[in-house]
Amino acid sequence: MTLAGQIGEHHLIRLFSPLRKVKRLLSSQTATNILFFAFCGAVATIWLHWLRDPFYVDLVGTICGTFDCPAWTPKAFLSTDPEGTATRLGLWGDSFGALNALLSAFGFMAVVLTLIQQQRDQHRQRFDATFFEMLNMLREEREGIRFAYSKRYVTSVPSTQEMDDKPDQKSYRGRNAIRAAAREYSFWMRNRINQLDLIQHDPDTLRAALAKLYVSKVHSRYESRLGSYFRVMYTILEKVDSDRLLRPAEKQRYGNMLRAQMTNYEVQLAALNGLADFAKDFPLLIQKYRIMKYMRKGKLRTYLIQIYGPKAFAGRDENEGFVNIIPKR
């Protein structure tokens, strides 16, 4: 995109940003209550000014004359005719039945809206409890992960290559196991860097190559541990995404909380796991909730941008208009 196009896009984003805020405000329960009470206040104001302002007298008189309701007019109420005063007052009092019905209808609507809001609040509380229980389950699954470097990796990687100590074949656990798995994958990826660079502009071929490398060198060796961990992660995202009562902003908030639990190595493995054939729509959820937003820059990130698209790594305001670019298998 040219510089002029980028500047134009930036101004459009700034122009429509306040409109999105107004839309979110109008869709909230607070805005609904404000509009309801504002309407009631307007009705009360007009009613109280009936007998004082000639404008309201003429306006209401015209409306009531149109609908053949002379008893509602202030002039009829203020009539000095002694013979018809009692009759007019009776008719005027009876005319309050329509107003009472209208106010009762609005009162009923307010009760319904309150019940709906209470239902949403209760649902959110239950969802919060379930969500944090699943986060605890995810942590337990992560602590259960085991991983040991392969023999070729141990003999090929020198101790000075981004290592705290020389790698060996002891079994790592938890986050250390995830870090070890990500480092071994990076080793095998660097061995095929020339081949991957040649196909990096073909997303389908690049995805197949990265997925095959991940499954053969990492996942298949410890499938019982890694598979369970990523299935729980997928279940959390799927539950958030499929909930019908949560608003989009609330869903993004839950996605952000999940992302905050993950290290850079976990993000890398999750993105690679999403490329495998058994991942179903896991990559779509990774895209939508921007799990890779803070992924460390490097060759792997460059490849994943070609596959997932730049919007999967963008911030919230830049990610408006999310488009699925991963074809369904």
Image (cartoon, helix red, strand yellow):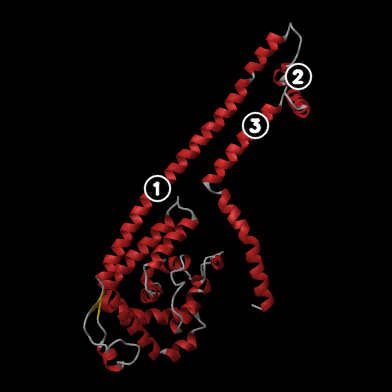
Q: Earlier in the sequence, mark 3 or mark 1?
A: 3
Q: Secondary structure at mark 3?
A: helix
Q: Nearer the viewer, mark 2 or mark 1?
A: 2
Residue position for label 2: 75
- Residue type beneath disc 1: His
Mark 1 lies on a secondary structure that is helix
Disc 3 residue type (three-letter): Val
The Cα atoms of the two marked residues, 3 and 1, are separated by 35 Å
Q: Is residue 199 visible?
A: yes
Residue 280 can be seen, yes or no: no
Front-lying residue, 113 or 74: 74
Of pointers 2 and 3, the one earlier in the residue sequence:
3
Circles 3 and 1 in contact, beta carbons < 8 Å:
no
Looking at the image, which residue sits at the far top?
83
* Distance from the alpha carbon under mark 2 to that under mark 1: 53 Å
In this rendering, is residue 261 above or below 85? below
Residue highlighted by disc 3:
43
Q: Which residue is mark 1?
A: 123
Q: Quadrant of the N terminus?
A: bottom right
Rendered view: 14 above or below 200? above
Mark before the other along the chain sequence, 2 or 1: 2
Residue 303: x and y in percent read 47, 81
Q: Are marks 2 and 3 in contact (CB under 8 Å)?
A: no
| Numbered mark located on residue 217 in the image | none
Residue at mark 2 to residue at mark 3: CA–CA distance = 19 Å
Dot 2 lies on which element? helix
